[in-house]
Amino acid sequence: MRSKEKVLKIENNENCKIQKGITLIALVITIVILIILTTVTINFLFGEVGIITKVKEAEKTYSIESAKEKLELEKATAIIEGKGATTIDGYFDILEEKEIIGNKQNDIEDNEDGSYDVITNDGFIFEVTPIPNKDNATDIEIEYVGDATGPRIQKINVETTTNSAEITVEAVNTENGKITYEYKKQGESNWKTVEGAEGNSCTINNLEENVIYNLRITIEVTNGDNKGRATRNINFITREMPEGAITFKDIEWQGDGTASILVNTSQEGYILQYQVVTTGSVVNPEQDLPEENWQPINSGERLTGLVHNQTVYTRLYDGTNDSSYASVSVEDKIAPSVPTINITTGTAGNNGYYKSDVTVTITAGNDAQSGANKLRYAVTGAQTITQTETSNGTIKTNVKISADGTSTITAYTIDKANNVSTVATKTINKDKTAPSTASLTVKTVGETNIAVTAKGADSTSGVYSYVFQRSTTNSTSGFTTVATQESTATSYSYTYDNLSAGTTYYLRVIVTDKAGNTATSTAVLQKTNESYPTVQSKLKKGDWVRYPAAKGGNIDCVVLYDSSSSYGIQIIAMRTVEEVTLGSDNFTTAMNSYNSAISTLNAKASAYNNGTYSSSARCVGSVPNNINSQSGYHATQFGGIYSGKLRDADTNYSTDWNQMSTSIRDIGIDYWLASRDVDDTYSGDGFNVRNVYSRGYLTNSLLCNVNASGSTHGYSVTNGLRPVFILKSGIKITGGTGEEGNPYTLGV
């Protein structure tokens, strides 16, 4: 970091610029007059305080002011376009785009005191200091601090192939300098110098493909005003040799024992090469293919003279690297077609099952070369036949399937050249046994419905469907089918609906397997419940209700809103269900926690929602019919960059708060309200989440603040969570008196 001593400071105003221009012109005229009159000494003209020296100083002053004007102009652009509204980076981006500086990496230095040194392409150093202002923007102060000398590397361009890299360097102050290019593979320790490289570009050859290289460029100037040394390191990666770019097609047999094949590649700029070897003699192409045996071939050229049991290997070559190999084997055989497998006898059941023994006929497929010769077949599954081959010349055979269950037949055609076809498969499903299990049990009983569980088992074809029946007369007759449910599960849940309250029913299930065999369960006797009142007709504000929460057991609640409200029936827990911590000692974490406080509290409360009885759950203090409602962002007068980053105050809590009586508010413990409050004072802004003190008083918990000085603080606060449950329509009151000691109980 450079010294903070300033070399020169020039005020930026129009009077100064006009005065300097006039001064420069006046000095030039003075020189001319003095020379003409020849009454001035040489020392007066060219000495350290002479006229010429003063002119040069004025010229430099003018150049410095011109460079500063460019920086000031782009400062205005940065503020107008918003690129420098909150950070200095946008301003530096513009300086680089407008080529006022070479690049940010070389020409920007962080002084670590809030200011930066900027080296312009004119060769001057300016100190740039960002200053946040009250208009939520970033002003910029610019001061000239000196001249930039020494070589500077501004930009390095690298263009790569699979085995080379073309390097171009853009630099300044390099006159009488020497440029050195060095490279190495990433991870290696020794650098290699590019021999013979001169000027601002060079080519590095004989590189490996798809490898990361480290490049080091050094410019050294040993004399003159720009004496110094500049070094810059970058990485580049060579291109990867193309893969899968070679194809083979149209293998043709010529009738003389030889074959030909067409070789193609879609890649240009590489040498296409091949080798022909005996099939099986090459285990590892990288090791077993001699480099001297590779021969060139043109893409689209047909390779001829190939014989049986040969393999053609091909690759692409760039003079240094080779691609992965592509290969094709030459054979004098073509597999025959698959055999056919047909069922010739058997009694069909349902879903592709048979209820009797099955006879299957296997017939060999065709072969246009040597001709079909025999069959190979096997049977697995319920019935097994080990792999068997027919005798030569036998191309048709019969197989009998007598075992219950699923049997799979596989068969192949074998031609006279011993080529084997792809497999033909036929699955035979056979089942003539009824399901082994058919039972029905009652799970829950309502006024107009009975929920049951049916069980079925079939070890052969498996369960296919459940037929649910009911009767009001007796256990053996008068049954009506009310539903048929297809399912392969061994257990199925079903609810008999549209029943009459207080009525006795006989219920049974018929289990059907996939083959169509059935088994009927024993009928069960069940009476529906008597009619109960609904929560809409029964509950009033202040009634006590016992709520079966999704976790933590039952929660005693009080009706906060009844059916006379527009919010539906909502009940509030009369205790906290857990402790929730918001905020943090870290300001950023505390700010995020503050901004998401409403959704966090509502999400915590939602975990206690029992979907059987309530549609949702929320944290008390949220808007009853819009639980995640929240304000916009607070425009704080302090903190600069934090304005518009923290949520504003809201009145979410007021609806619940005004609805809650003192006895409901005071539960003897502090708890959160899903609502925010903001304290604006002369010393800063405080951002709070509302809560209720243990004696029922409304108060706030500070999570973070932004002070007038710009400093920030975060705080961690823990309070209880008090959920509100929105009951579903139609939920029944099944017991209790609604008093604190005997709350109403809920049912469906």
Image: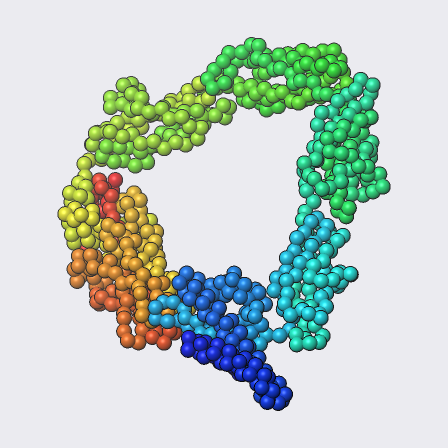
Q: Is residue 431 visible?
A: yes
Between 626 and 468, the one lying in front of the other is 626
- Quadrant where the image shows the N terminus: bottom right
Q: Residue at x 68, y 21 (%)?
A: 421
Q: Residue furthest top?
A: 345
Q: Is residue 543 visible?
A: no
Q: Left or right: 528 with respect to 41?
A: left
Between 358 and 223, the one lying in front of the other is 223
Q: Residue at x 30, y 76 (%)?
A: 683
Up/down of 425 relative to 742, above or below? above
Up/down of 374 relative to 67, above or below? above
Up/down of 466 relative to 619, above or below? above
- Image quadrant in which you'd find residue 281: top right
Q: Residue at x 24, y 58 (%)?
A: 652
Q: Left or right: 241 with respect to 308?
A: left
Location of residue 106 in the rendering, given as x and y in whole percent from the top left corner: 59, 67
- Image quadrant in which you'd find residue 271: top right
- Quadrant where the image shows the C terminus: top left
Location of residue 428 in the rendering, given as x and y in whole percent from the top left corner: 56, 19
Q: Residue furthest right?
A: 292
Q: Left or right: 119 with respect to 367?
A: left
Up/down of 61 relative to 313, above or below? below
Location of residue 306 in the rendering, given as x and y in whole percent from the top left corner: 81, 26
